Image: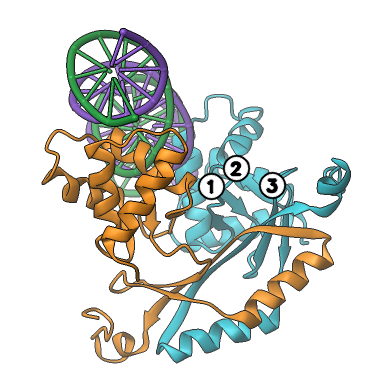
Chain colours: A orange, B cyan, C green, D purple
DNA sequence: GTACTTGCAAATAGTTTGCTGTCGA
DNA sequence: TCGACAGCAAACTATTTGCAAGTAC
């Protein structure tokens, strides 16, 4: 992925374009999100950002993350296994969620995409948003109690 | 679908089998759910059941639908467009959710099923639960502002 | 009779909002 | 300077829990 630095610059540029102010809180939150790929929870971000900006509260996290979603830098995912998470991968994709280790794996399938389109088409609908999550167990986990993905 | 009456009997039988007591509240809630196919919200059930059992509270609704889920009579669905809903169709299926009219349409696709399995298989996972929702707009709605599914 | 249930209120979790002092442009 | 923002607390929504009184079996 792009560097954290370049992402940060893009955020600053976009905020500026929209007349939004560049504050140390917003920068810290953007950096926390882009410093690591993946699906960040609000709590995770809160803890990470606290180190740099001690008095930053949850409200600021929520408000800033909302801005990042609006600007298209992150997407919001509500999984069944816990609180809302924010994903830095802007590409539309589906998820495998391991019920054992909580690991979230992204996947895309052009065939599934095509089938989704044809289902929607058959009902004269146009797809605006997809939510496709497979909640899974590791087969190894089931056989010998050891989850092969835990430490990935 | 089966009659409300027969469903009610099945619920009573299953509760009895599990040593759960048959109370007028539980019966009323089961009847409210099975009196109409579809995706019931807690509020909807609350209002419907209030007519028969006036002092019945939300806690009882929540506790009872949990039992019905545990017994496999209904499934729980958390859509993005609002609160949790409880679905009387026990068959595993996917959803089209119209962002205009809120209508929820069920669908199944064996091809998609197969593709899901092969994705999971490729990661050595076993699928425990699927969540597949397509949030859509009516094409007519987009063209002339009229939603063709609103009154279905 | 006794354990399971209910109803109510209070607790909880996650998120949003209102207000006031602060700060970026 | 001055309107937007941050911090804090309080509000809010959806759901769960504790407990005393009620009821099925």
In the picture, measured across the screen, residue B67 lies left or right of residue A85, that is: right
Q: Mark 1 lies on which chain?
A: B
Q: Are marks 1 and 2 in contact (CB under 8 Å)?
A: yes
Q: Residue at left 18%, top 46%?
A: A49
Residue under disc 2 on the same chain as residue under disc 3: yes
Q: How far apart are labels 3 and 1 at the CA level?
A: 16 Å
Q: In this view, does A12 lie above or below B95?
A: above
Residue A33 percent coordinates (x, y): 29, 55
Query: Residue B125: horizontal and vertical position, in percent?
Result: 41, 85
User: What is the secondary structure assignment of the residue under circle 3?
Assistant: loop
The residue indicated by pointer 1 is: B84
Do residues under tags 3 and 1 come within 8 Å of each other at their CB atoms?
no
Q: Are marks 3 and 1 on the same chain?
A: yes
Q: Which mark is residue B99?
A: 3
| Above or below: residue A38 compared with residue B115 | above
Residue at x-position 75% and y-position 43% = B101
The quadrant of the image that shows the N terminus of chain A is bottom left
- Which chain is disc 3 placed on? B
Q: Of residues A81 and B87, which is closer to you in this image?
A: A81
């Amino acid at each position: 992925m792009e560097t954290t630095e370049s992402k940060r610059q893009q955020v600053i540029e976009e905020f500026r374009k929209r007349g939004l102010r560049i504050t140390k809180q917003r920068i810290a939150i953007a950096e926390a999100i882009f410093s690591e790929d993946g699906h960040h929870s609000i709590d995770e971000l809160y803890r990470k950002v606290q180190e740099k900006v001690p008095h930053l509260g949850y409200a600021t996290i929520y408000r800033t993350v909302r801005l990042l979603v609006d600007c298209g830098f992150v997407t919001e995912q509500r999984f069944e296994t816990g609180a809302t998470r924010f994903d830095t991968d802007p590409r539309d994709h589906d998820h495998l969620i391991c019920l054992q280790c909580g690991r979230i794996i992204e996947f895309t399938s052009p065939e599934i995409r095509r089938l989704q389109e044809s289902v929607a088409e058959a009902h004269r609908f146009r797809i605006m948003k997809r939510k496709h999550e497979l909640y899974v167990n590791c087969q190894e986990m089931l056989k010998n109690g050891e989850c092969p993905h835990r430490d990935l």
